[in-house]
Amino acid sequence: PQHSKRPFPNDDSLAQGASSSIVRGPSPYENVLYEQISCLVGAQVRSKIQRIEAGVMNLLRSCLESEGGSSTSIISGHVDHHQSLSSEDKGWGCGWRNIQMMSSHLLRQRPETREVLFGGCGFVPDIPSLQRWLEIAWDKGFDAVGARHFDSKIYGVKKWIGTSECVTLLRSFGVRARIVDFDSTESSSLQGKSGKRVCGPMDKYLIKTNPLPRSSSLELSQEDAENMRGQQVLVDWVWNYFSSKRADVLHNSKNVIISDKTCPSQPIVFPTSRSFEDYSWDSKAKG
């Protein structure tokens, strides 16, 4: 399967139509949408997972603490592991599985989110149910660009989804979500002498850690972009994100820090070349 090459929509596009029905009564169309939601809440199926005693993150913490050495790891709180299955979604379901893992964290760590996600059912639905929820989000007016890309139909379709679909789904439930776009260094937009204008948190981070000459402080040159190849830039950004507030920790040992950065605040969502969504970056060795 091929990944989507469409650009990420901006926040206004994703949130389009979210408040369109506030000042008027429900229309016949909205009544139909309400009925669809009610039916889905009752019909959705819980995703099956392999239960791990004490949870996978506690198991990971124990393994990291037993390693010893001088490295430090930062992990998130609770998350259930939803793995791709050859009989269901192998080869195309990674985006949906990441949504499921993110949702398991939100349902456990944030009571206010538990009340709104998936109609307040309290569990993580299977992929077909998630596909129905995404179609409803499109019907509500979220991410018109994405809806057109998939012709407003995703149920039963074995296609890659990307970060914007994850964000669209979360925002349709009223959950605050943000896209952090790590630009491809081989993108044609980075070619030429003019470079790329700084516009997002990743760009600002790069400028801060790799300051440019004053004459071009607001632009990334082609040479600078080429120096940013590889995954190290992303890994460094994630490490700084989770380690920037060391006081907000749930557990702190010699080797392992459990950060609550994703508990009171929004999940962190990363688009990569594989349209990967995730919120729980597990660990990074610090020499």
Image (tube, rainbow, N blue to C red):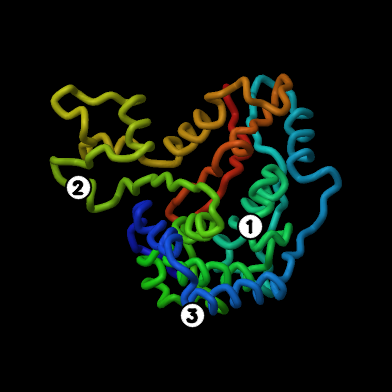
CA separation, marks 3 and 2?
Answer: 50 Å
Q: Residue at x 63, y 38 (%)?
A: 263
Q: Position of residue 57 (x, y in %)?
A: 73, 41
| Tag 1 residue | 117
* Circle 3: residue type: Pro
- The residue under label 3 is 28
Q: Quadrant of residue 46?
A: bottom right
Q: Which of the image's four quarters has the C terminus? A: top right
Along the line of sight, the residue nearer the viewer: 117 or 182: 117
Q: Residue at x 47, y 56 (%)?
A: 163
| Residue sitting at the far right | 53
| Nearer to the camera, 264 or 76 | 264
Residue 257 image-quadrant placement? top right
Label located before the other in sequence (2 or 1): 1
Place of residue 53 in the rendered image (x, y in percent of width and height, measured from the top left): 86, 47
The mark lying in front, picked from 1 and 3, is: 3
Q: Which residue is mark 2?
A: 191
Q: Residue at x 44, y 64 (%)?
A: 21
Res. 29 in view: yes
Q: Which mark is residue 19?
A: none
SS at badge 3 = helix
How busy is the neighbourhood of tag 3: few (under 14 within 10 Å), some, or many (20 plus)?
Answer: few
- Find the distance from the CA under tag 2 to the CA under tag 1: 42 Å
Q: Is residue 94 above or below residue 249?
A: below
* Residue 260 appears left or right of 19: right
* Element on which disc 2 rests: loop
Q: Residue at x 62, y 60 (%)?
A: 97
Can the viewer see residue 274 in this picture? no
